[in-house]
Image: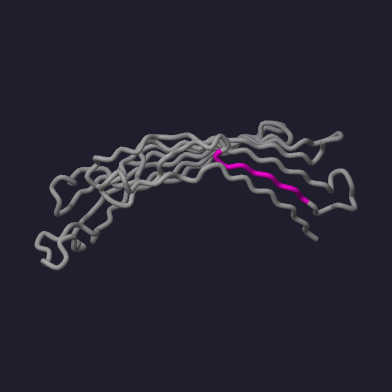
Amino acid sequence: MMMRRSRTADILLVTGSAFRYRLTQSNVLTQDPDPPASNPWAQVQTGEVQVRGFELEGKANLAAGFDLVASYAWQDSEITRTNTAAQLGNQLQLAPEHQATLWAHYTVQSGALEGLGIGGGLRHVGRCFGDLNNQIELPSFTLVDVALSYDFGKQDPLLAGVMLRLSASNLFDKRHVTSCASLTSANCYYGEGRSVIATLDYRW
């Protein structure tokens, strides 16, 4: 299901969308109930999972050069067929129930700083499980991202097309766990730390 609504009044522009889904996936890998002696961890494609949820997104142009984008996603996942009794009804591995983002960006419209863009936002990922037995819980985390840009052409027509960009992901270098490779917590991995990227582009 999709919905879109918009409202314009002078410079204010607000748009939104919503999407709801329900999915069933069959032939999912699950433990072989009668594995060969040479491979006790063998799997067969007889499992099934169900996922339902919805996604919301809103965009707003609050003033000249000032934009705001927000999104939220809710997901409920369940293992509905498996050869491992302890996993039946459990939440899928690495499938957080809640996720959300918020991003604001402002571009200076006039004066000595015209062409300067400043942005910042948040990324939130709710808690989830790192294994199908739901014994390894990965805590929720929220990361901060920022961005700067400068359009040289706004100050000097001879530099039209020259753009400088600087972005930083996970600005505060927050330690967070994003994945697990097996049923042991020793095989879980941290997500990317602080990352800073600068680019200078020229378009003609």
- Which residue is pictured at 75% across the width and 48% down the height? 164
Q: Which of 203 and 164 is in front in this view?
A: 164
Q: Spot the residue most to the front.
A: 186
Q: Position of residue 66 (x, y in %)?
A: 69, 34
Q: Position of residue 33 (x, y in %)?
A: 11, 59
> Residue 6, can we see it?
no
Res 83 → quadrant: bottom left
In magenta stretch: residue 110:
no
In the image, 91: left or right of 168?
left
Q: Which image quarter is the C terminus in?
A: bottom right
- Which residue is pictured at 44% across the width and 35% down the height? 141
Give the tally of numbered discs.
0
In the image, 74: left or right of 77?
right
- Which residue is pictured at 84% across the width and 52% down the height? 160
Q: Nearer the viewer, residue 15 or 173?
A: 173
- Which residue is pictured at 68% across the width and 48% down the height? 198
Res 9 → quadrant: top right
Describe the colour scheme in one phrase.
Answer: one colour
Q: Which of 147 and 98 is in front in this view?
A: 147
Q: Where is residue 24 in the image (x, y as percent from the top left)?
A: 28, 53
Q: What stretch is highlighted in magenta?
A: 163-170
In the image, 66: left or right of 175?
right
Dominant SS in magenta: strand
> Residue 82, can we see it?
yes
Q: Position of residue 127 (x, y in %)?
A: 36, 36
User: 203 above or below 54?
Assistant: below
User: 33 above or below 165?
Assistant: below
